[in-house]
Image (tube, rainbow, N blue to C red):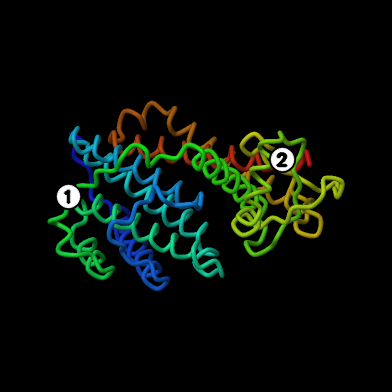
Amino acid sequence: PGRDINLSEKRVEGGRNFATKLWNAARYAEMNGCRFVEDFDPRSCQRKENRWIAGATRDCAMAVAAALEAFRFDEAAHLLYHFVWGTFCDWYLEFTKPILTGDDAAARRETQAATAWTLAQLLRLLHPLMPFVTEELWRELGGAGLLISKPWPGLPPDLHDPAAAAEMEPLIQDISAIRAVRAELNVPPGTSIRANLFDPEPAAERRVRSNSTHYERLARVQFVDASDHDETSVSVAGTQITFQLHLRGVVDIAKEKARLAKEIGRLDADLKKFAQKLANPDFLAKAKPEIIAEQREREADVRRERDRLQTAYARIAAG
């Protein structure tokens, strides 16, 4: 805010992709029977996934309202973008897929109603920023009247369920950490990895065991006994717990170390070039400020990537 910015085609593409993501989520909900239920109270939910998303939606609504009241429209858009794309689409919808296709009719009905309720709140929150797509989706999902005439969501504080959040948030962090290591080591997405818990705290172990199906589906790990261990393993730090991923038959350790070392060397060479350029008085004196800023940003990106690969190398070398 308060400065001119160049039109970025990537930002336009990002907006298009977000609209597509939201549209696809709404179509997915519709195809799975998630229609708006009048007078649905999310506080009545029994499933932890549904109690968690209700509380998270309430927290998001409060943050967005505060940003709008402070005229921080950029912050409001940022909050909604990441909540809709990440928390709702990438996590909640994935967590609840087995429920919507499962045999437990009561859990399925609850999840259908909770999904529709959450989507309704998100459409209301998004409406000031993207009115046309949200208005169309509101109609498609059976919303009564025009969305523009609906009040801003007034969600009560007791929607936040500390117990559900304490179980679901670490689950997301754990799965994200395992996925990151899988990506670092070029593990094929569809390949399941054997894993065990290393010296876990009892409460953390209970949390992991009770959510084992989520780990198996979304992190692609298969839990084995701690004694079933091999020397080609890597450690992944979770939330109050450490996962040991067994790589025998999955990753060629020597080949992967060579690949990482080569890539780290290439990035080190790039960083050396950036350092020389940004230390050159002639370049700093003649280049436009935006060009210098772009070079510093690119250098930071390369450094982050180099650090990420160095961590991966150290992890696999230690294993």
- Name the residue: 55% across, 68% down: 102
- Viewer-proximal residue, 105 or 283? 105
Horizontal and vertical percent position of residue 52: 46, 46
The kind of secondary structure element at disc 2 is helix
Left or right placement of residue 272 versus residue 16 in this view: right
Image depth: mark 2 or mark 1 in front: 1
Q: Is residue 169 above or below residue 16?
A: above
Going by the numbered disc 1, the residue's amino acid type is Pro
Q: Which residue is mark 1?
A: 151
| Residue at 41% in and 38% down | 297
**Which amino acid is tagged 2?**
Arg
| Disc 2 from disc 1: Cα separation | 51 Å
Q: Position of residue 64 (x, y in %)?
A: 27, 40
Residue 21 position within the rendered picture, expressed as x and y whole percent measured from the top left:
37, 62
* Label at residue 310: none
In percent of width and height, residue 132 lies at 18, 62
Residue position for label 2: 315
Quadrant in the rendering for residue 193? bottom right
Q: Nearer the viewer, residue 93 or 15?
A: 93
Q: Is residue 181 above or below residue 94?
A: above
Query: Alpha-carbon neighbours of circle 1 within 10 Å: few (<14), some, or many (≥20)?
Result: few
Q: Secondary structure at mark 1?
A: loop
**What residue sits 73% from the left and 36% below the top?**
200
Locate residue 115 relative to residue 70 in the image: left or right: right
- On screen, residue 273 above or below 88: above
Which quarter of the figure is the N terminus placed in? top left
Q: Residue at x 67, y 36 (%)?
A: 203
Which of 110/227 is in front? 110
Left/right of residue 17 with respect to residue 168 in the rendered view: left
- As drawn, 161 above or below 188: above
- Mark 2, Cα crowd under 10 Å, few <14 / some 14-19 / many 20+, is some
